[in-house]
Image: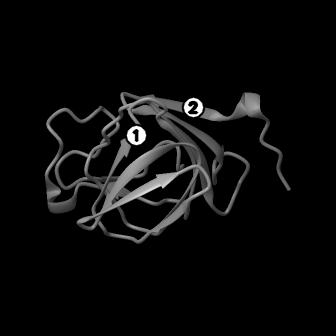
């Protein structure tokens, strides 16, 4: 049994928001990675995919999620089960942004579908065909 105190949570800031690791293999020795996403109002996330199923639950604000060519509007109280290896992109509400809790298997990797990097991708984003474990999943 582990307790991860709020003060000990790992925070990673990107141009789109803040990811706070609540539990992971390296934080609390958890068998799953659990993190909170605080997306900035009007955030337009990059096109990307994960190599494992990822579960998102919105606890504040709203978003539009593009998943495999479909668009879904979600808000506080909604949950999406995003399948592995399906292209996705998220757009935060322009006024409220969104807050979500996300769960994924440990070691889950993110990558660019088709191996094409976003031209303005942040330093943490995978480059070309690279696959990376985001810091909030470790």
The reply, left or right, for residue 33 in relation to residue 69 is right
The reply, left or right, for residue 24 in relation to residue 85 is right
Helix or strand or loop: what does disc 1 sit on? strand
In x, y percent, where is residue 137?
Answer: 52, 50
Residue located 83% across and 45% down the image = 3
In x, y percent, where is residue 109?
Answer: 40, 58
- In the foreground, 38 or 70: 70
In x, y percent, where is residue 42?
Answer: 36, 32
Helix or strand or loop: what does disc 2 sit on? strand
Work out whether 67 lies above or below 40.
below
Q: Residues within 10 Å of mark 2 (few under 14, many from 20)?
A: some
Residue located 46% across and 69% down the image = 53
The reply, left or right, for residue 65 in relation to residue 113 is right
Quadrant hosting residue 5: top right
In x, y percent, where is residue 115?
Answer: 16, 57
Quadrant hosting residue 65: bottom left
Residue located 29% across and 56% down the image = 111
Question: Residue extending furthest right?
Answer: 1
The CA span between labels 1 and 2 is: 19 Å
Check disc 2 and report the residue beneath it.
11
Quadrant hosting residue 9: top right
Tell me, for residue 37, which label it has, or none: none
Check disc 1 and report the residue beneath it.
92
Image quarter hosting the N terminus = bottom right
């Amino acid at each position: 049994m582990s307790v991860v105190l709020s003060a000990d949570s790992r925070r990673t800031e990107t141009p789109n928001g803040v990811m706070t690791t609540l539990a992971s293999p390296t934080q609390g020795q958890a068998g799953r990675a659990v993190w909170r996403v605080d997306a900035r109002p009007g955030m337009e996330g990059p096109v990307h995919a994960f190599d494992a199923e990822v579960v998102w639950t919105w606890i504040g604000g709203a978003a539009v999620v593009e998943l495999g060519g479909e668009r879904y509007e979600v808000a506080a109280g909604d949950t999406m089960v995003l399948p592995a290896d399906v292209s996705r992109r998220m757009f935060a509400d322009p006024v409220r942004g969104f807050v979500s809790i996300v769960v994924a298997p440990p070691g889950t990797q993110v990558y660019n579908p088709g191996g094409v990097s976003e031209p303005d991708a942040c330093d943490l984003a995978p480059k070309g065909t690279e696959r990376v474990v985001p810091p909030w999943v470790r």
